[in-house]
Image (tube, rainbow, N blue to C red):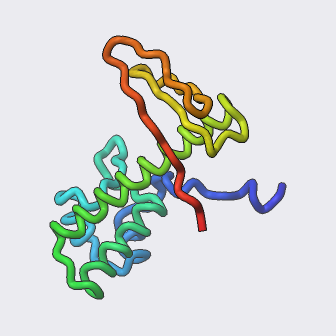
């Protein structure tokens, strides 16, 4: 087996609270409090025990850094984490749109596209207008140049 076949899923809930606390450098009671506040949401076993993933541990370390090094209160940290999750979701969605565009019109990253209400995307030629359906909208998208 190759080394890459032994990768651990970072979202797999494998650590009990005592191990998660030690790995994150926090007290178990702090982890319980963060769970109550919704800063970190570990999975639960059938007996209601908390199980933390490697991703949860990374989030706990980031919470500690934001709190101790940046002086941000827990409400601010919660909002930051929510916004980071939202950005990640939007980035994934954008990647899906780019993939869909590439499947529909390969190599057409500099073209104009129209999207209908159902999410159907059509490439347009220069100067061409999209077919109008009742209630439809024209969406122009121009990707930013990547550095």
The image quadrant where one finds the C terminus is bottom right
Residue 99: horizontal and vertical position, in percent?
Answer: 62, 39
Q: How many marks?
A: 0
Residue furthest top as drawn: 134
Residue 88: horizontal and vertical position, in percent?
Answer: 43, 54
The image quadrant where one finds the N terminus is bottom right
Residue name at image x 60 percent, y 34 percent: 126
Answer left or right for 109 relative to 61. right
Residue 71: horizontal and vertical position, in percent?
Answer: 21, 84
Above or below residue 125? Residue 70 is: below
Which of 78/95 is in front? 95
Which of 69/13 is in front? 69
Above or below residue 29? Residue 102 is: above
Answer left or right for 22 relative to 70. right
Residue furthest bottom as drawn: 69
Residue furthest right as drawn: 1
Residue 105: horizontal and vertical position, in percent?
Answer: 68, 32
Residue name at image x 38 percent, y 67 percent: 59
Answer left or right for 59 relative to 70. right
Above or below residue 140? Residue 24 is: below
Residue name at image x 57 percent, y 60 percent: 145
Res 41 quadrant in image: bottom left
Residue name at image x 61 percent, y 35 percent: 101
Above or below residue 60? Residue 106 is: above
Which of 121/16 is in front? 121
Which of 68/101 is in front? 101
């Amino acid at each position: 087996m190759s080394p890459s076949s032994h990768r651990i899923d970072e979202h797999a809930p494998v650590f009990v609270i005592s191990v998660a606390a030690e790995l994150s450098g926090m007290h178990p009671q702090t982890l319980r409090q963060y769970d109550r506040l919704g800063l970190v949401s570990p999975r639960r076993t059938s007996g209601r025990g908390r199980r933390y993933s490697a991703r949860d541990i990374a989030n706990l370390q980031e919470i500690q850094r934001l709190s101790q090094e940046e002086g941000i209160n827990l409400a601010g940290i919660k909002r930051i984490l929510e916004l980071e999750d939202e950005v990640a979701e939007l980035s994934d969605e954008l990647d899906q749109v780019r993939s869909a565009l590439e499947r529909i019109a390969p190599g057409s990253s500099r073209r104009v596209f129209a999207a209908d209400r159902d999410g159907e995307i059509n490439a347009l030629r220069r100067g061409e207008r999209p077919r109008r359906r009742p209630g439809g909208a024209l969406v122009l998208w121009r990707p930013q140049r990547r550095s």
